[in-house]
Amino acid sequence: MAKLALLRHGESQANAANVYTGWNDVPLTDKGRRQAWAAGEKLKEVRDFHPTMIHTSLLSRAIETANIAAEAAGFLYLPVAKTWRLNERHYGALRGLDKDVSRKIFGKEQVLEWRRGFDAVPPAQGSPTIDRRYWGVDPQLLPRAESLHQSQLRLLPYYEDEVA
């Protein structure tokens, strides 16, 4: 019996353009919307899966994916919790940069280490994220760049308190 389903957002405009996204708020493409619908249809087919809650980040692409998948699966009645702790990893100064260009600037090995290494942190953005969706969050908690490990540490308190 399925207890937890994890969905990644559908293709975003940044994915299609091959640029780093992180905490940049970019919409889904039409392909991303179709992917979200297909994910919802697959969830609908899972036997003995009766979710009680939907959790998503504060990023539009994730919220839109959750909404579309919930509609396709017949789960629109479920409550939805949104939190910055489920945001994608913060790519810092790489946000908005073409991935191929980043490899030319920093080298393939360095970019690979930032993207796939557990503790490697990309260059920090010059100033903290100033967006009203984060006004209620202690600014000291908001990253300016983070490793996969730091992303995990950001996510785990929410997972343990709200999901598990």
Image (spheres, rainbow, N blue to C red):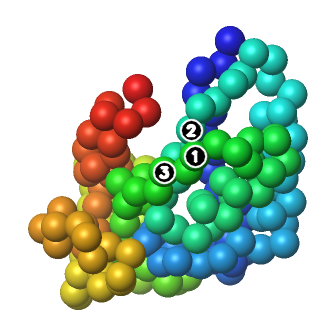
Distance, label 2 to label 3, CA atoms, is: 8 Å
Give amino acid for label 2: Met
Mark 2 in CB contact with mark 1 (< 8 angstroms): yes
Instruction: Name the residue rendered at 64%, 43% in the picture.
Output: 78
Q: Which residue is pictured at 84% across the width and 72% down the height?
A: 30
Nearer to us: label 1 or label 3: 1
Q: CA distance from mark 2 to mark 1?
A: 5 Å
Could you tell which of marks 2 and 3 lies nearer the N-terminus? 2
Look at the picture and state if 55 lies above or below 124. Answer: above
Which image quadrant: the N terminus? top right
Instruction: Estimate the spatial distance between the alpha carbons at disc 1 and disc 3, rounded to whole Å.
Output: 7 Å
Q: Amino acid at mark 1?
A: Pro
Instruction: Give the labeled residue for mark 3.
Output: 81
Q: Nearer the viewer, residue 38 or 122?
A: 38
Of the pair 117 and 95, the residue shown nearer to us = 95
Residue 68's disc number: none
Relative to 65, say whether 104 is above or below: below
Height in image: 150 above or below 18?
above
The percent coordinates of residue 92 (x first, y second) are 33, 74
2 and 3 marks in contact (CB < 8 Å):
yes
Give the structural element (helix, strand or loop) at label 2.
loop
Give the residue at mark 2.
Answer: 53
Q: Are marks 1 and 3 in contact (CB under 8 Å)?
A: yes
Crowd around label 2: few <14 · some 14–19 · many ≥20 (10 Å): some
Q: Nearer the viewer, residue 138 or 26?
A: 138
Q: Which residue corresponds to mark 1?
A: 79
User: Eyeballing the image, is 135 above or below 140?
Assistant: below
